[in-house]
Image: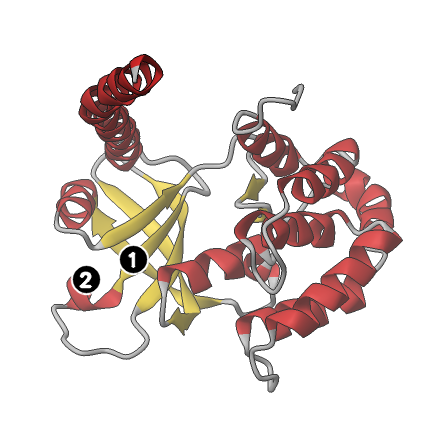
Amino acid sequence: MIEFKKVYFKHKKLILLLPVLIASLLFAGIKYYQAQQELEHNQIKNPLLNDVYIIDKEVLNNQNRLREKYMITQVESVDEKNVYLKVSNYIYFRVNDAITGIRSDKLLIHKFFSKEILKISKSRLETLWLNGGVNEVGRSNDGMHLYGGIIIPKPKQNLIKEQKNRIGTQENQLAISYYQGNMGYEKDWKEAFRLFEQAAEKGNPYAQISLAQMYRDGEAVDVNFKRALYWFKMAKKQGVSSAKDEYAQLCRKMAECIE
């Protein structure tokens, strides 16, 4: 009977502490969200060359019920009052599809961007963001990569190194088509996973990142943080800065991981 009371009071204390823990987690989540919003707002107010925005075409043009409505834009130039944006010829159904396009190096494809430049005032760009018309604000840490993809061409002196990194490119590009369900291929994450794995084992760093992300997110495979860390680490060794960031972020979630 005494043992029962001890267990009872122990669990009662835990139950009483549960709301406090939930409140603490909610507070931390809110603070993180607010910090991210503040960062995005600052980047919108102070645009830089090659910043990338995923813009909702419905909000931009006051249109309704567009099936595919998200477009990728990239800052071409900035003056005192205006921002000049390159606008993708491709329109996406979901924000995640657009992000996948960026991480798949789509911005480097010939004619990915329209020849027409969108001129938008800085004040209107800020208003568009405040109204939910800018769904993602991306700024590269190294001036070249974003979401694991390349957003501007590499200097000529890096071409030889880049060619080495492109071993397994054919499998990687085919995997991307299966992952996204485009270029005449039906969406098939299992086949995408198989091809990413092939390219990753050949040493393609971008396939290694995609494979790691599928392990991390449980896409076509059970969630496996250890395998995800392994492939992020392999890409990280090849000098891909986004792999370093992804590795560090995942590492923080794992007690046994050492950055």
Residue 3 coordinates in the image, percent (x, y)? 35, 15
The colour style of the image is secondary structure
Asked which quadrant contains residue 25, the reply is top left
Amino acid type, mark 1: Ile
Residue 242 coordinates in the image, percent (x, y)? 60, 37
Q: In what quadrant of the picture does the N terminus appear? A: top left
Residue neighbourhood size for the residue with mark 2, other residues' Cα within 10 Å, grouped as few (<14), some (14–19), many (≥20):
some
Residue neighbourhood size for the residue with mark 1, other residues' Cα within 10 Å, grouped as few (<14), some (14–19), many (≥20):
many
Sooner in the amino-acid sequence: mark 1 or mark 2: 1
Q: In what quadrant of the picture does the C terminus appear? A: top right
Determine the residue positioned at 69% across, 73% down: 191
| Dots 1, 2 in contact, CB < 8 A | yes
For residue 60, which numbered disc appears in the image? 2
Q: Is 212 situated above or below 71?
A: above
Asked which quadrant contains residue 244, the reply is top right
Asked which quadrant contains residue 238, the reply is top right
The residue sitting at the front extreme is 1
Residue 183 appears left or right of 82:
right
Amino acid type, mark 2: Leu
Residue 197 coordinates in the image, percent (x, y)? 77, 59
Between the C-alphas of marks 1 and 2, the distance is 7 Å
For residue 187, which numbered disc appears in the image? none
Q: Secondary structure at mark 1?
A: strand
Residue 127 coordinates in the image, percent (x, y)? 12, 45
Q: Secondary structure at mark 2?
A: helix
Determine the residue positioned at 65% across, 22% down: 256
Question: Which residue position is annotated with label 1?
Answer: 55
Q: Nearer the viewer, residue 22 or 50?
A: 22
Determine the residue positioned at 33% across, 65% down: 70
